[in-house]
Image: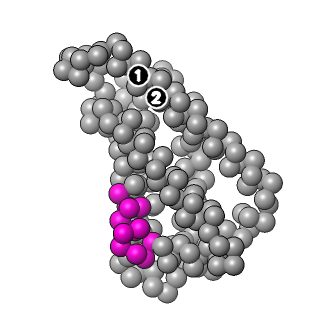
Amino acid sequence: MGSTGLLLLLFLCSHAAGNATIYMGSEVFQSYADELHSHPLIVLVFSTIVLLLFVIHIAFGLYLFFENRLVTPSRYAVDKKQAKNAFAANTMPYTGLLILLFVLVHVFGFTFSPEEIPISVTVKSALSGIFYGMFYLFSFAVLAVHLSHGFWSMLQTFGVNHPRYNILIARLTYIIPAFFLLLFGGIPLYFMSGAGASF
């Protein structure tokens, strides 16, 4: 879980860097998208690796979820291993499923969009709508909750829990999810608010 989570986090960073070009205008974003898709083999290999990471991460997540249910079958049992963020920890399976739903909607909405329509036009059209935009905003909020525990849990798995670093780790468990929420969540707000009208 920790290893696949780390690799997916790195993918999020690269995806965030690409999506940040949206704030620079449609021409910059379209140029980025065109350059990316001018290397179909690289995109195919990269996409396949990310898909495998998702499948492995979900499989291990479900395995751990059911293992924990077998160990503590009573939902009222006292949890002696409370994480820093108990709400995020207790909702990991559910936020994970919501993220999976978002990924499916995102892939089918943008990856398989009509080739004759520029992706910049598709993005603006989709995220300007209140329903689609709010769905994206909600999904990124869910992602932030998932990351807030996932990042902390990943570091614990790797043994990064020295008292010297615990204050920094505690802050990063909120800073990193907030960063992704602001960057990704800002995109639908950018279009829904009208700030991206000239995009």
Alpha-carbon span between mark 1 and mark 2: 6 Å
What's the residue type where badge 2 is placed?
Leu
Please state the extent of the stretch shown in magenta in the rendering.
127-138
The location of residue 155, given as percent across then percent down, is: 46, 29
Coloration mode: one colour
Q: Quadrant of residue 197?
A: bottom left
Task: Give above or below for 80 relative to 59.
Answer: above
Please name the residue shown 36% across and 49% down the image.
Answer: 142
Q: SS for tag 2?
A: helix
Q: Residues within 10 Å of mark 2 (few under 14, many from 20)?
A: some
Query: Element under label 1?
Result: helix
Viewer-proximal residue, 7 or 107? 107
| Mark 1–mark 2 CB contact (< 8 Å) | yes
Where 158 sits versus 98, above or below? above
In screen coordinates, is 44 left or right of 146?
Answer: right
Which mark, residue 132? none
Q: Residue at x 39, y 82 (%)?
A: 194
From where the camera sits, is residue 63 visible? Answer: yes
Residue drawn at 41 percent across, 18 percent down = 67
**Side of 57 relative to 49 (left or right):** left
Q: Which residue is mark 2?
A: 62
Task: Give, as a three-letter code, the residue at label 1.
Answer: Phe
Label 1 neighbourhood size at 10 Å, few (<14), some (14-19), many (20+)?
A: few
Counting from the top left corner in percent of width and height, residue 121 is at 57, 79
Does the magenta-highlighted stretch encompass residue 133?
A: yes
Taking the spot 78% from the left edge, 66% from the top edge, the residue there is 38
Residue 136 falls in image quadrant: bottom left
Residue 94, horizontal then vertical, whole percent = 36, 39
Q: Which mark is residue 66?
A: 1
The picture places residue 62, in percent across and down from the top left corner, at 46, 28
